[in-house]
Image (cartoon, helix red, strand yellow):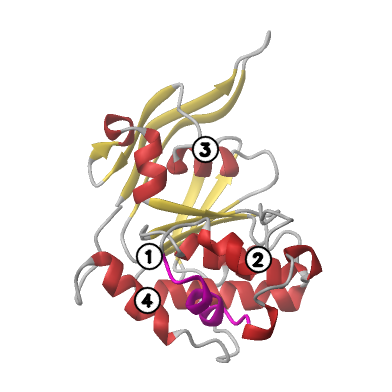
Amino acid sequence: MLEVKNVSYAYKTKKDKTILNNVSATFEEGIFYTIVGPSGAGKTTLLSLLAGLDTAVKGTVLCNGEDITKKGLNYHRKHNISLVFQNYNLIDYLTMVENVKLGGSGNAEKLLEEVGIGKEYWQRNVLQLSGGQQQRVAIARALASDAHVLLADEPTGNLDTAASIEIMEIFSELHKAGATVIVVTHEENIAAFTDRIIHFSDGQIIKDEINENPTKGSGKVHMKGLYRHFQKTAGTESGVVGC
């Protein structure tokens, strides 16, 4: 479980700009979340704090009840969370397989298959891929780690509608497999895929709602191997450990 308690964040300038103002939220295991709101609302800053990429001015970020600074932010990023970015953050001179291997010890080829990338593409330079394909590679790289919390910052922001739906279907399958998935977006139609929608505005949570009828995908994305992936990395056949 990930949690933020009374977290505030501000840019230190001549006129301090408050980005987050006393935010508290709990992200429970196995739930598919979106944090939704307009640009500048503080969504990405909150995700950065959850990921241990930055530290709050006030308040605490906890993983399973423990302050993430206790074992260190590097430990948190390595063992507890994995990240997917809007701009993919792939190494452009490496192949798909080489990029995925940077994420951890997971089987790169198998993970690429699971996210729908065929063998004929594996040795291609990532710059030869479409945006949707690059984001699939980025997701496979995130899955190469042992983490059970996946944080995604505007993962569909650079994609067309069809590719965006495919990416959200992959996240839905990951959620079904046991992952905790937290997606930042400004698009309500993307948020509609998820179980819980946290609405953000001016650095504060203004609404936290349960989505009773998440958008159903095409049914074409089936990643059965991901169930085995999460069971193996959890070390149990019945439950998920981690944040």
Residue 164 figure quarter: bottom right
Q: CA distance from mark 2 to mark 4?
A: 19 Å
Residue located 62% across and 84% down the image: 119
Disc 1 residue type (three-letter):
Ile
- The reply to whether residue 190 is in sight is no
Q: CA distance from mark 1 to mark 3?
A: 21 Å
Label whose residue precedes the other's in the sequence (2 or 4): 2
Task: Give the foreground label among 2 and 1.
Answer: 2
Q: Is residue 214 above or below residue 185?
A: below
Q: Which mark is residue 31?
A: 1
Q: Is residue 110 above or below residue 53?
A: below
Q: Dot 2: within a 10 Å radius of its alpha carbon, few (fewer than 14), some, or many (20 or more) residues?
A: many
Q: Dot 1: within a 10 Å radius of its alpha carbon, few (fewer than 14), some, or many (20 or more) residues?
A: some
Q: Is residue 82 magenta?
A: no
Which residue position holds label 3? Answer: 204
Given residues 42 and 144, the one toward you in this image is 144
Label whose residue precedes the other's in the sequence (1 or 4): 1
Which element is circle 2 on? helix
Which element is circle 4 on? helix
Residue located 56% across and 35% down the image: 203
Q: In the rendered view, does 243 fall on the left or right side of 16?
A: left
Which element is circle 3 on? strand
Which residue position holds label 2? Answer: 135
Task: Give the foreground label among 1 and 3.
Answer: 1
Residue located 69% across and 66% down the image: 134
Which residue position holds label 4? Answer: 177
Q: CA distance from mark 2 to mark 3?
A: 29 Å
Disc 4 residue type (three-letter):
Ala
Q: Magenta part of the protein: which range?
A: 106-117
Disc 3 residue type (three-letter):
Gln
Label whose residue precedes the other's in the sequence (4 or 3): 4
